[in-house]
Amino acid sequence: MSAYHELRAHLRQTAALSEVAGRLGWDQQTVMPRGANGQRAEEMGAMEDVLHARRTDPALGDLLEQAEAPDTVGTAILREAKRDYARNTRVPARLASELARVTALAQTAWEDARANDDVAAFLPWLEQVVALRREEGHAIAQGGDAYDALMQDYEPGSSAAQVAAIFDRMRPRLVDLRDRILGAPTPPALQGHFPQEGQLRLAHDLARRFGYDFERGRIDLAVHPFSSGSGSDVRITTRVATDDPFNCLYSTLHEVGHATYEQNIDPDYALTPLGHGVSMGVHESQSRIYENQLGRSAAFTGWLFGAMQSEFGALNIDSADAFHAAVNRVHQGYIRTESDEVQYNLHIMLRFDLERALIDGSLAPSDLEEAWNTRFRADFGFAVDRPANGVLQDVHWSVGLFGYFPTYALGNIYAGCLNGTMRADLPDLNQHVAKGDLSAATGWLADRVQRHGGLRPSVETIAHACDGTPPDEEPLLAYLEAKFGAIYDL
Amino acid sequence: MSAYHELRAHLRQTAALSEVAGRLGWDQQTVMPRGANGQRAEEMGAMEDVLHARRTDPALGDLLEQAEAPDTVGTAILREAKRDYARNTRVPARLASELARVTALAQTAWEDARANDDVAAFLPWLEQVVALRREEGHAIAQGGDAYDALMQDYEPGSSAAQVAAIFDRMRPRLVDLRDRILGAPTPPALQGHFPQEGQLRLAHDLARRFGYDFERGRIDLAVHPFSSGSGSDVRITTRVATDDPFNCLYSTLHEVGHATYEQNIDPDYALTPLGHGVSMGVHESQSRIYENQLGRSAAFTGWLFGAMQSEFGALNIDSADAFHAAVNRVHQGYIRTESDEVQYNLHIMLRFDLERALIDGSLAPSDLEEAWNTRFRADFGFAVDRPANGVLQDVHWSVGLFGYFPTYALGNIYAGCLNGTMRADLPDLNQHVAKGDLSAATGWLADRVQRHGGLRPSVETIAHACDGTPPDEEPLLAYLEAKFGAIYDL
């Protein structure tokens, strides 16, 4: 057997074990008995140890040196596998293990701190996590920038400088748009009681219309919506608030975007380094375009308006235009995950600047709350009322996800590019979408983006889909200005 | 760290990984999307490879040689771990891997063969499985008896000679009892339509009454009822036939017996070699005593008669005595799993003799069908009508489970012993059981048997529970003769 084939076998087994570990996470958040928590932590720890040993196995290093790629797929596999191996072997086992231990405890501490609005109780944990991740960043960077190194875990090929430049160009136009919207009359919100059974029936219908394959997936209830798994077992979760059906329906569309990306990857790439989404940014581009550019389009909300009346009876909103405005309501708020398309990226910019400063040491964890509050007032024009609505709102920093936040904004930007190219390619798209038929759109995305998995780095993946044009923020901004200009009659 | 503590850490991680692998099996049979079958096979194969490597790790062998047990628990852990290590390292990796591959294929071949009553199609697979397991038995036995060696996988400490002697003593009394029953009038069967929702509600109620802890378990639907997991995550499944509620209810009680055994083991033994049932025979003793000696007792069926009327309305049977007779109906039949308490062990004796002959080579696989049919007519007094009701009815031989069948009969025998001692200890037991209160019985079993897990070998486990008396068949036979003598007025 050639080194290349031995390498493929090694990677394949690791990928299969990684799927198993991922499914433990799904199980824990959907069906696991409550009393199994302690035992489950040991089970997951044991799987992590097995995976870590395989990912840093010197025999794997030898194979990566010796293997010769027979084709372009093989070249891409080697590229991804070599990057992962270099990253994993640069982090001392002691540090990796300490990070796993501390972040598990820090997440619980964060949950308690958020529940009690107690920043001081979380501070010692934050200090440890920042110190460990900074150390890890430096270990990976080998003399380069630690924050840039951490970003590679989520968006390989990205850099903080490049993201900062994009954000500098986006901010004034987003702020201007937001201010004009908030100066205009606020459209009425959807109100009423929407039984769980009807919401779930409609969520399943939406998932099917957006191309989710239930032969290789399923939808369950969980506290937080997520998508899990790759290849032929990709499961999603949703949640139901009986006074707010958009929560269930749009979180379902979001997760269906993630899940169909995984389901539609070329089966030949299954259980290889190309067999899952190439980056968090490209992943988010799929979830966002499903949820926003498609799901919140006037064409689709027109169809959904009728579907909701069929499911729930008469609504408090009586026209498709008003329904479209209700779905796309822009409102002042503290919380990133509840934000609208216009303000969402402003939430990301705030976090990006603060977490860069935490990692480069120019901001001490003890000064983070004040820095957050000052920045929030400057960016959003009103004061944070309590830490749970401010610096403690997101789980990310407690579990060490520094460098992750920018991928949400990159996902929005990529989705803007894809939407522009797709609509130019499919001029009749809205006529189908208005009938609840998404197949032309999801087929286009499957062909242009999803089936390629990790074949090309993320920027090249988007450029390939957009006829060679590399991604930038302009299509997203133009889309937002046009869409919300029309809704708010600006 | 001492060798003993290093050993404990090694075993603990293996046990945690084994729980993960087991839960993949649960997932596959309950919630897995249908299209995930192929990927799941790779995931399970990867877990098996990891587990096999750990279980035959030379470093484990060194630790087992060096470790000194600090107490009786440590002595038991070393006993179990040394036996497993010796067994696993005696089997060449090539043979273990070939067995896994061939039995996976043979099981599918068996399913098809049974569906088509096609013994010839299954024969080449049976020949391979018999040859491989015989080779494995000889490798483990190291000059001893191959069938005895295979029995140790399921009932350590047992031997074919000892089981054969027990069966020789049991057979005439069981045949005599069966013949007298079949000569008496047959009681009416329960008939009607029993909706799934009501059956599942009652099954959950029964599980609670028999002590199943839903904080550390759950009940799902599956094609075959089973119990899965140990420690704080022990899940069971059931199935529903709307014309036969006893199928759901008594399979639930059976699995609750298995599951509470696992749930009630001393938490200090969790993720050690003592943290699961000590043998298949002792496991089956718990499932059988829950299902039969308790669940099919007149005291309990008296309570169940009322509970079923509450759930389903009036029944076609109008007295508690007639209901008890319907629950315990003895009838001629081909199928082991549908058999009654009286004839069940006769089905086991047939299989035991045939599989011993297959392993020692005195019966060729090509002669198995004829041997089965001849023996069945001799033992049961009527002819097998088709292979699916005869030699092809059980999955066991297709997956290599030679030496497993006798543990069902040993479980019945152990249950008979436990029932005798328990009822002598708890003279008022029936008064509580008649009110649907099983706590005294399940508490007695938890204390005498279940909490000890693998601390003592199986015969010692039963003897310990029975005030020092080693198990024999007499209590079971006396129980059956008294119970069915009363029901059939013999």
Image (cartoon, coloured by chain):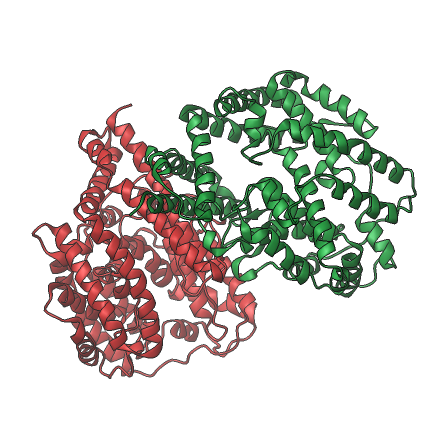
Chain colours: A red, B green
Quarter where residue B320 is shown:
bottom right
Q: Is B435 above or below relative to B250? A: below
Q: Position of residue B440 (x, y in %)?
A: 67, 61
Q: Residue at x 65, y 48 (%)?
A: B287
- The quadrant in which the C terminus of chain A is found is bottom left
Judge by depth and name the residue closer to the eye, B283 or A230. B283
Q: Position of residue A452 (x, y in %)?
A: 31, 43
Q: How many numbered marks are there?
A: 0
Q: Is B196 above or below relative to B391? A: below
Quarter where residue B435 is shown:
bottom right
Q: Is residue A227 left or right of residue A198?
A: left
Q: Residue at x 47, y 72 (%)?
A: A241
Q: Residue at x 46, y 48 (%)?
A: B73
Judge by depth and name the residue closer to the eye, B232 or A152. B232
Judge by depth and name the residue closer to the eye, B65 or B318. B65
* Residue B249 visible in the current orientation: yes
Q: Position of residue A278 (x, y in %)?
A: 27, 48
Q: Is residue A469 left or right of residue B452?
A: left
Q: Is B54 above or below relative to A422? A: above
